[in-house]
Amino acid sequence: MTHIQSLAPENRVPEVTVDFWLIKLLAVTMGETAADYLAVNLGLGLMATSFLMTGVLVVALIQQFRQKRFVPWSYWLAVVLISVVGTLVTDNLVDNFGVALTTTTWVFSVALAVVFAVWYASERTLSIHEIFTNRREAFYWLAILLTFALGTAVGDLVAEHFGLGYLATGILFGMIILSLGIGYFFMGIDPVLGFWLAYIFTRPLGASFGDLLSQPREYGGMGLGTVITSAIFLGSIVLIVLYQSVTRRGRAQAA
């Protein structure tokens, strides 16, 4: 029995725990500030930064697909990079091509719905507890990329287009996520639906607080700058990932 269990395929993505959501929130915050740092502070521009980070992401995803199991550093490296690229996708459409935030929000919403529909039609499940084939993992990462792009569009739409500002936007999306948590624990909301909705809304939540910390005071921020803000969140991510690696927290056999 032990030998048979040892041959069972392992889930390639982590179990959803408190530290999962904590790293995810830190990653999206860093994705926002790191994208701004590369494009603005280093003067690379959106297009050059996008090509550079997309190339790095492709290398990271190749490494991730080779693992065949959940390896904390490899998985979370891909998440951080895909957060940066997802942010840049939306920023390019809005800033370089003049696409309205309302349009990008609808486009990415439809694209994500299509990915979920094709994923379900192909695999008959959207569960993140059974990502143990290359095809399922490909669907998973494509969905993750679109959630970051969509979350960026939604967050910018609320904070900038509707003028709520960074703090109010962060509080708004924090309340939405809190309501999803209440729905999951006390009202029987579908766990797969609840997970993906929370994954989408943690993007504008993290980005709002990232902008709040990094942006100059005249733009409604606290003026810490992108370097300090990115360093704080990157250091926090590294510490939690080291904890996961040592304790093997987050790993589970696929059902």
Image (tube, helix red, strand yellow):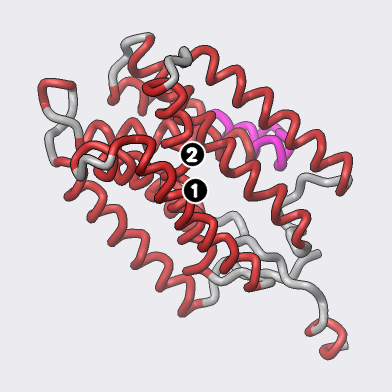
Of residues 104 and 244, the one nearer the viewer is 104
Of residues 20 and 159, the one nearer the viewer is 159
- In the picture, residue 167 is in which quadrant? top left
The stretch in magenta equals 177-195
Q: Is residue 232 above or below residue 175?
A: below
Confirm or deny contact between disc 2 and disc 1 (CB under 8 A). Answer: yes
User: In terms of secondary structure, where does tag 2 sit?
Assistant: helix
Q: Which residue is mark 1?
A: 82
Q: Is residue 172 left or right of residue 213?
A: right
Q: Residue furthest top?
A: 162
**Distance in Å between CA atoms under marks 2 and 1:** 6 Å
Q: Which residue is mark 2?
A: 86
Q: Is residue 228 left or right of residue 66?
A: left
Q: Is residue 165 above or below residue 139?
A: above
Q: Quadrant of the N terminus?
A: bottom right
Q: Position of residue 231 (x, y in %)?
A: 23, 55
Q: Position of residue 61 (x, y in %)?
A: 57, 60
Is residue 167 magenta-colored? no
Q: Which residue shows up at 72% across the image and 29% down it?
A: 113
The dot on residue 29 is none
Q: Position of residue 52 (x, y in %)?
A: 40, 50
Q: Is residue 2 above or below residue 112?
A: below
Q: Amino acid at mark 2?
A: Gly
Is residue 182 magenta-colored? yes
* Magenta span main SS: helix
User: In terms of secondary structure, where does tag 1 sit?
Assistant: helix
